[in-house]
Image: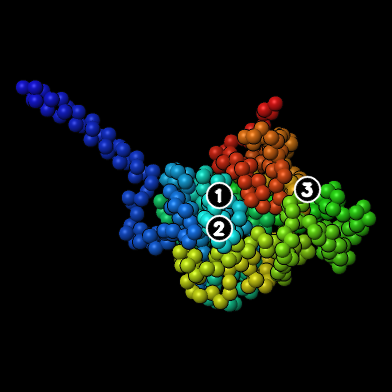
Amino acid sequence: MALSSYSQYFLSLLPLLLTFVSFAKGNLSSGSGYDELSSEILAQQQTDEVVRLPGQIPVKFKQYAGYITVNETHGRALFYWFFEATDNPHEKPVLLWLNGGPGCSSIGGETLELGPFFPQKAGTKPLLRLNPYSWNKVANLLFVESPFGVGFSYTNTSTDFAELGDTRTAKDSYTFLVNWFRRFPQFKSHEFYIAGESYAGHYVPQLSEAILDNNKNASKDTFINLKGFMIGNAALDAEADNEGAVDYAWSHAVISDRLYHDIKSKCNFKIQSDGCDAAFSELYAEYDGIDIYSIYTPICVNGSIAQHYISGIDGWHRKLLSYDPCSSTYIETYLNRADVQEALHANVTGIPYPWTRCSKEIKSWNDAAESVLPTIKKLIASGDLRIWIYSGDSDGILPVTSTRYALRKLGLKVIEDWIPWYSDNQQVAGRTTIYEKGLIFVTVRGAGHKVPMLAPKRSLHMVEHFLANKKLQSDSPF
């Protein structure tokens, strides 16, 4: 009799239990999307999964790497490296990171600045140091080597290089994203953001514009859920960038009064001239013995600064392609190992040159906008995007003065001006200025050109607030 009572009680609860199970299953499904993937897509993802890198300690997050074709006819493909978030990747946004140059690898950004793994000197254990401030703590993190000719990305059509420039880079990057989301459709509905530094001040707004323009008539298959972008120490406007570099060098005691006035008299900063170029060469000579990318950081004394010049990028732009061999030797040694390339599914076509942080294969740049401010104005006016522009305040190549001059040219009303923000150690981490229509400018105190590398904790704090659409803490802890 007791058994019968329990049976009746259980049967009365059964509909409720079935409803709960159905709800839970539906919730998990909609959260991850993995159970909806076709066998073909699963096979592609399994092919790209990076099981274990040489010298890597075990991690809980998944990583993928490989190629996405952007032009089948020309045999053009871009290499990517993708890290799922350290927790709840099915809920976190997707963040694409782009380095600048033009011609410098975003994998350099992963291995030097904000990715999970930093290669160390050969013989060090572990060979890959885990970055405690990796941005995949707050987002699913995607790196792509763009344009072709950079890093492991390639084209089988040599004439493609003749049209390489801002326009081709934006078009190929857009095609890459459409095809990447086809390979990883479980992330397609996630919020999508783009971030980058230096010449990515061109790449990021131009790619954002391409996405918004194409989204107007996009099908469900090609729509990209872009929510915003952030750019740091960015090339924005040639006039502002040039003038800001001069004023920064003088105000930070790098150049003399004589040279400062000489440059001011010979340059109008809008039009290139031989006299102005000569004066700028003298300015850059004053940075010998100083790291122009981080003026208070000790320089590498074990090698000279390597330079590669690209025609079509005039004046100060050329200086962007300099890099410090001491910071890239370990990375280049690691990424040129055959076992590492095999683990990353990289260099599958046998590229006849080594991986370098900044490409020596790109000899010319077909089009470089003098200013991306019109593009940024258009993106601000759309009202659809969250836009943050940040600047490490010890960078001499694209200094905070250049960014301030460029933002002034936008003509936006200032809502909150030069408010200090604080990191969790109660120190002033920088300043923020909030403009009308939502544009936010952030300085990062003590950081140079590569903010995530030189101020890793503050940069993670900053990007976490950006993604969450939260203001940086401005209340003084004192």
Q: Are marks 2 and 1 in contact (CB under 8 Å)?
A: no
Alpha-carbon span between mark 2 and mark 1: 15 Å
Between residues 401 and 125, which one lies in front from this camera angle?
125
SS at mark 2 in the image: loop
Alpha-carbon span between mark 1 and mark 3: 30 Å
Q: Amino acid at mark 1?
A: Asn
Where is residue 473 drawn, in percent x and y?
Answer: 64, 33
Side of 24 where 408 appears, left or right: right
Disc on res. 401: 3
Identity of the residue drawn at 65% across and 46% down:
455
SS at mark 1 in the image: loop
Disc on res. 131: 1
Q: Amino acid at mark 3?
A: Thr
Q: Indicate the quadrant where residue 155 lies.
A: bottom right
Quarter the C terminus occupies: top right
Q: Is residue 344 above or below residue 5?
A: below
Disc on res. 157: none
Q: Indicate the quadrant where residue 283 lies.
A: bottom right
Where is residue 385 drawn, in percent x and y?
Answer: 58, 45
Camera-nearest label, 1 or 3: 1
Camera-nearest label, 2 or 1: 2
Q: Counting residues from the N terminus, which is met first, the one under dot 2 or under dot 3?
A: 2
